[in-house]
Image (cartoon, rainbow, N blue to C red):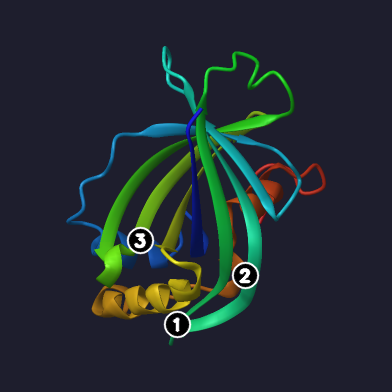
Amino acid sequence: MGMDILDSLEVRWFLASGDPALLALDAWFAADTPESDRTDHYLVTERNDLGFKARLVAGQPARVETKFLVGSLGPVQLGPDAIGVLERWRKVSFVTDDADLEKEGAWLPVTKSRRLKKIAHDGGQTTAAELTQLEYTWRGERTVEWTFGVEAVGPAPELLAILLAAWQSTGEGLAGVSLRSEGSLSYASWLRTRTSTAHGAGSR
C-alpha cells in the first residue's frame, strides 16, 4: 500500500451562501473552470486537531486522507479586511479496498464543486487557492455553503513565506473582500460545528 506524507500551512474560511464576500471571490475565480463534482466522506471525530476523509468511487479503491494538526499561529492579519487562522497540518494519504471502511462511526458525505488556482514558487513549492461550494445533508437538513482557502505545500521552514507570498500575489483579486476571523476554520473544526449534538445541523 503506497503512502504519501505532506506538510502544509493553510488558512480557510467558511461562508454562508448570502455572504457579500462571495461576489468578489466568485469574480476572482470566474476564469477558472470548475472541476468535476466529487463527494468526500468525512468521519465525525468531534476533534479539531484530526481529520479523516475518504473519496469513494464505485469500482475503485477508496482514497483516504488523514490530517494531523501540528501547530497554529492563531488569527493573523493577512490584509486590511482579512483575518484568518493559520494552521500547519501533516497529511497522510493512501488507497485502500477495505469494504468495511464506512461501517464504523458516523460519516458526513459532502458534495464539492471546486475552482482552483495554483501558484508555483521557486524550488518546486506550490500554493493553491480554492473556492468550493459544499452541499451536504445532516439529520435531514440540507445545507449549501462555501469555503475559500489558501494552502502552501513545501519544506516546513519555508511554508509561512510561501503562503504569505501567495497571498500578496493575489493583490487586486481580493481587494475589498471582508474575511473575518470567526469564519476561519479548518475542515476538522468546521465538521465538528456542523455535526455537534449540542449545536445541531448548520450551526455557526
Q: CA distance from mark 2 to mark 1?
A: 13 Å
Q: CA distance from mark 2 to mark 3?
A: 20 Å
Looking at numbered disc 1 in the image, what kind of residue is underneath it? Asp
Residue 187 at least partly seen: yes
Looking at numbered disc 3 in the image, what kind of residue is underneath it? Ala
Estimate the x, y position of residue 49 in percent, counting from the top left: 70, 55
- Above or below — where is 196 with respect to 136? below
Most foreground residue, 53 or 77: 53
User: Which residue is labeled 1 in the image?
Assistant: 81
Residue at position x 80%, y 42% from top?
A: 197
Residue at position x 35%, y 34% from top?
A: 37
Q: Are marks 2 and 1 in contact (CB under 8 Å)?
A: no
Mark 2 or mark 3, earlier in chain:
3
Looking at numbered disc 2 in the image, what kind of residue is underneath it? Glu
User: Which residue is labeled 3 in the image?
Assistant: 129
- Above or below — where is 94 with respect to 200? above
